[in-house]
Amino acid sequence: MKSFSGKASLMATLVAALVGASSAQAAEIKIGVVLPLSGALSGYGQPSQKGLDIIQAITPTLKNGDTIKLIVIDDKSDKVEAANAMQRLVSSDKVDAVIGEVTSSNTLAMTKIADDSKTPLVSSTATNDRVTRNHPYVSRVCFSDSFQGVVGANLASRDLKAKTAAIVFDSSNDYSVGLAKAFRTQFLKNGGTIPIEVQAPGGSKDFKAQLASVKAKNVDMIYMPIYYTEGALIAVQSKQLGLTNRWWAATVWPRIRSSSMSVKTRSTAI
């Protein structure tokens, strides 16, 4: 049950591996799920759980008759809690595989446990390149930061014809750092310049000083790979400051819109 081969789609990876284990009698397959169902990142975790509930309702039994039992743990949007949840699932619950986490930082806290216990860990949206690098038991079913950041930079240069850009990111967030790095490298390679980079720390409420600094540079566009909580506040404060630059953002906040912001979303995960 603990074998893992290849990097396939989320449910296909889990189901195919489990269906392949022949059994004379129907068995219960235990799959752990680690999600941020409460806390700052619950806006990602709760929809993810609903998606899993739908899939389980559609396919509660595998073709060989085995049933799937989901053991869901709320990591409270905390990477230490995510690691503790992973340890409990493999040590106490004896799960066959684990789905999670939805963020890069929290998933990174779980990867060593997955490898050490030889338990397949599959994240739907953890994009940081380090999530799967040198981790044979860890997979993702989304694009990596290195891919998304390059695509974002190319679209900014070629579609928006942007020559100058600002980057607004959170240096404490693995997701944000990974995307900012990839965008920065490719945008400069394309011949663009980045005259300013500012921090938008997670949990902060006031970004007017950073935004005023960005406004003063009069750049062609602004790249902002951060989470929706801070993104929403920045959208409101940008309008208040009259910041009318084009923004290139991640789809972790696709519903944020402001009349003062021309927002394009291109990143697909977190």
Image (spheres, grey):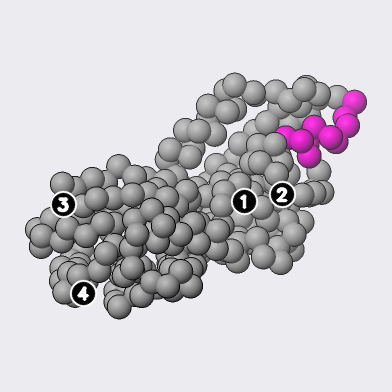
Taking depth in this image into account, of 160 and 176 the one nearest to the observer is 160
Q: Nearer the viewer, mark 4 or mark 1?
A: 4
Please tell me which of labels 2 and 4 falls first in the chain.
2
For disc 3, the neighbor class at 10 Å (few under 14, some 14 to 19, many from 20) is some
How many angstroms separate mark 2 from mark 4 (CA)? 43 Å
Mark toward the viewer: 3 or 2:
3
Magenta residues span 15-24
Q: Is residue 85 above or below residue 214?
A: above
Q: Are marks 3 and 2 in contact (CB under 8 Å)?
A: no
Residue linked to disc 4: 217
The answer for how far apart the CA atoms under marks 3 and 2 are is 41 Å
Q: Secondary structure at mark 3?
A: loop
**Residue beneath label 3, please?**
260
Q: Earlier along the polypeptide chain: callout 3 or callout 2?
A: 2
Place residue 147 in its image quadrant.
bottom right
Name the residue at the bottom extreme.
195
Q: Could you say where residue 227 lies in the image, as x and y percent from the top left?
A: 36, 56
Q: Disc 2 designates what residue? A: 7
Q: Mark 1 — residue? A: 140
Inspect the image, locate mark 4, and give the three-letter code of the amino acid beneath it.
Lys
Q: Earlier in the sequence, mark 4 or mark 1?
A: 1
**Pair 2/4: label in front:** 4
